[in-house]
Image: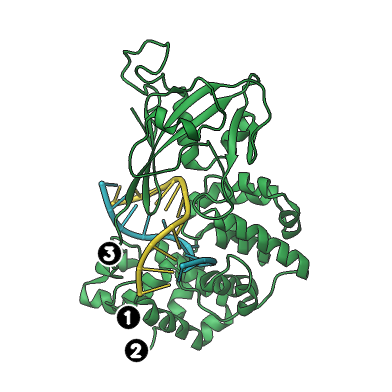
Chain colours: A green, B yellow, C cyan
Amino acid sequence: MPDPPSAIPLLAWYDRHRRTLPWRGSGGGDPYRIWLSEVMLQQTTVAAVGPRYGRFLARFPDVAALAAAPWEDVAAEWAGLGYYARARNLHAAARAVAARGGFPDTEAGLRELPGIGAYTAAAVAAIAFNRPTVPVDGNVERVVARLLSIRTPLPAARRIIAPAAARFMEQEAPRARPGDFVQALFDLGATICTPRRPACALCPWRGDCAAQREGIQETLPAKSPKAARKRRHGLHFLARDPAGRLLLRHRPPEGLLGGMLEIPGAPWREDTWTLEEALPHAPLPGLPWALRAGIAHHGFTHMDLEMRLAEAAAPAAPAPEGMAWMEPASAQAALPTAMRRLFSLSEAPLAEGAGAVASGGTGARGARRKGISG
DNA sequence: AAAGCGGGGCT
DNA sequence: AGCCCAGCTTT
């Protein structure tokens, strides 16, 4: 394994070109803010986190406030961000931190908290506590794979990349400012050493990059092929009570959309559902369900989902076990994106032959936003 | 080692 | 229509 290049040119570049980001502003060094940003940024782009970070911080300004909050508030604030286990773990970790009287200030201590793996422990240790460690995220994998021209495909290449990245901390300059060094690596990967069309001419390491010398930088890192996505179908039931409230159901705490709200329905399966077939899965018996036109599409990492929506007016009644009547505005805000798309079908006309309303329309007119089709 | 787990932004 | 993203947890 060749020596890594000197970190000095990278740090000099960072001092001139570092990105201005919400979690780099005032309050610097606050481990709560840095931890929150790292968790939000797990598999999530800076652009997506941007508008959500300040909002979350305003609602839960410190770890004590987050620890004291009920899960429903945390879930509603996280809704739409995805990977909801992050929110569950964030909440649990906040309670653990509050109970022990503050954040652990070492990588090993941080690693014990729920939702903190090898990457996040190293990132918080370096950025919040200036511990000399190198977190390896997608940016660092790409930068190191190119610098050293590592052709082994991911994820196997991590066995080579991680120790190579760790060797940077043998140098004096990064040890003097670990937080800046690791963020310099992130910024380099995000703005110069990008997945496609990297700006090698502007790179502080342009003379040190083995892949660039070989002209293969755009092909690295190589990746193993991933499995194909399955397709599943659902039919869901939206009941409205006389006050206009919606009947929603709590999903189980673990698994897909764990701990989040949903519009109750028949289980997702390979075959499509007919309304009659799905009727036993309706949340309330004996209602005059009418199918809406259109299908809500939602792609998860491992599954493409197509959902239809039936609606009915319900008499005033207590919500069944595990469900709740909710005002439409607060309900929609607390729903994960897949369920928001499904809910938007309620603006569509009734499906052909679905009830007393004459058809003749062409489907979900006015509902052709992303994920909706007729 | 592989699979489950969201959603948005960009090409 | 893919690919990628400041990954973690469970099997």
Percent of width and height locating residue A47: 47, 51
- Three-letter code, disc 3: Pro
Q: On the rendered structure, is A366 left or right of A343?
A: left
Residue named by callout 2:
A2
Task: Give the residue type that dot 2 points to.
Answer: Pro
User: Between residues A90 and A22, which one lies in front from this camera angle?
Assistant: A90
Mark 1 touches mark 2? (CB < 8 Å): yes
Q: Position of residue A6 (x, y in %)?
A: 42, 83
Above/below status of A58 relative to A219: above
**Disc 2 chain ID:** A
Between A50 and A254, the one lying in front of the other is A254
> Relative to A199, is A206 above or below?
below
Residue A148 tag number: 1
Q: Earlier in the sequence, mark 1 or mark 3?
A: 1
Of the numbered discs 1 and 2, the one sitting upstream in the chain is 2
Where is residue A372, by image quadrant?
A: top left
